[in-house]
Amino acid sequence: MAVTIAVLKETHANEARVAATPETVKKWTGAGLAVTIETGAGLGAAITDDAYTGAGATIAATGTEAAARGDIVLKVRNPSAAEIAALKPGATVIALLDAHREKETLQALATKGATAYAMEFVPRITRAQVMDALSSQANLAGYRAVIEAAAAYGKAFPMMMTAAGTVAPAKAFIMGVGVAGLQAIATARRLGAVVTATDVRPATKEQVESLGGKFLAVEDEEFKNAQTAGGYAKEMSAEYKAKQAALVSSHIAKQDIVITTALIPGRAAPILVTKEQVASMKPGSVLIDLAAPQGGNVEGCVADQIVDVNGVKIIGFSNIVTNIATDASALYAKNLQAFVGLLVNKEGALAPDMEDEILKGSLVTNGGAIVHPALNAQGQG
């Protein structure tokens, strides 16, 4: 019998993404796999059941029915208790499991005997780039953060010279120059803002400048020698950190838009903007905090709320990419398509190589136990 891939509708509130598109379904059915989609799973991403059936999928009436059919079960976020209960014995589950925090979900998957892979644990190696869901979603998060900032900001982003006067460009400051930060820089520049950015890694200065932004740092001799011969960042002195903190504080006070992007897996988000710095900003300024689900980079941030501090808006998004669900789903579905390719052989049979470094790196439950070293080192969380 052909391996069946089951795609479930997301059960988390405010989650519009879906784990497969007609394009990925067509690839699987063309390779001899069976695909079952829970009815309505794609509607949040503008994908109808008819589009899936047109690609060769069958439709299941409920999530538990779809889960019960799946040899491989795909989701965006972690499955519900009912979905886990409905799994086939030995089923494989692949999702962004939020494994550091979702201890009960992992334990339920282990108890069920499921083999579960966390897409957030896919190793960041060259061969796995096409499976890097964190990067594919962060890229869109950085773009959308600027769009949301523009919507919340009461003025225009670009300079406009009119007969009635000149509109000054917005000043945008991006804190954290990873995938999301780089896309935020590029998008804010395209909209006409004057963009600055900072990061704890001095080596990111070149990337910022290549996108038309200005890197904010105390550029003394210590800064210039802040990278080892191997390309790693050196720990900066207490004196340098104090000078950099003073520079950032004075800079934040002059900004219209601040976007923070710093997340550390399994840990609370670092505070990048203090209450005092928020208080120093002009009324009408906007802070977009992409680290809200892990406590936020901005003091006073509340996930999924807009906090008004004397006219300064702090906007905390716990899932900003749901606001761009069609593209987010398309990219995530491609990540999953590549990952499933490691589990299924050319004959269409389930035959994972458990010594493959990508599978080993992302495997979280197997054989009735939680097996990932990072989770067991933390007491399974």
Image (cartoon, grey):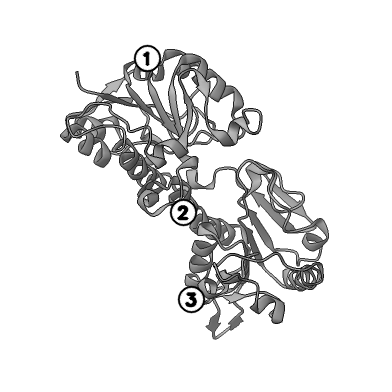
Q: x, y percentage for residue 215? A: 61, 75
The secondary structure type at the circle numbered 1 is loop
Labels 2 & 1 near each other (Cβ < 8 A): no
Q: Is residue 16 visible?
A: no
The amino acid type, in three-letter code, at marker 2 is Leu
Q: Nearer the viewer, mark 3 or mark 2?
A: 3
> Which residue is at a point 42% across and 52% down the rendered structure image?
125
Q: Rounded to the nearest whole Å, what is the CA distance between mark 1 and mark 3?
A: 50 Å
The residue that mark 2 highlights is: 140
The secondary structure type at the circle numbered 3 is helix
Q: Is residue 312 left or right of residue 332?
A: right
Q: Rounded to the nearest whole Å, what is the CA distance between mark 3 and mark 2?
A: 19 Å
The secondary structure type at the circle numbered 2 is helix
> Which residue is at a point 75% across and 67% down the rendered structure image?
282
The residue that mark 3 highlights is: 210
> Which residue is at a point 40% across and 20% down the rendered structure image?
63
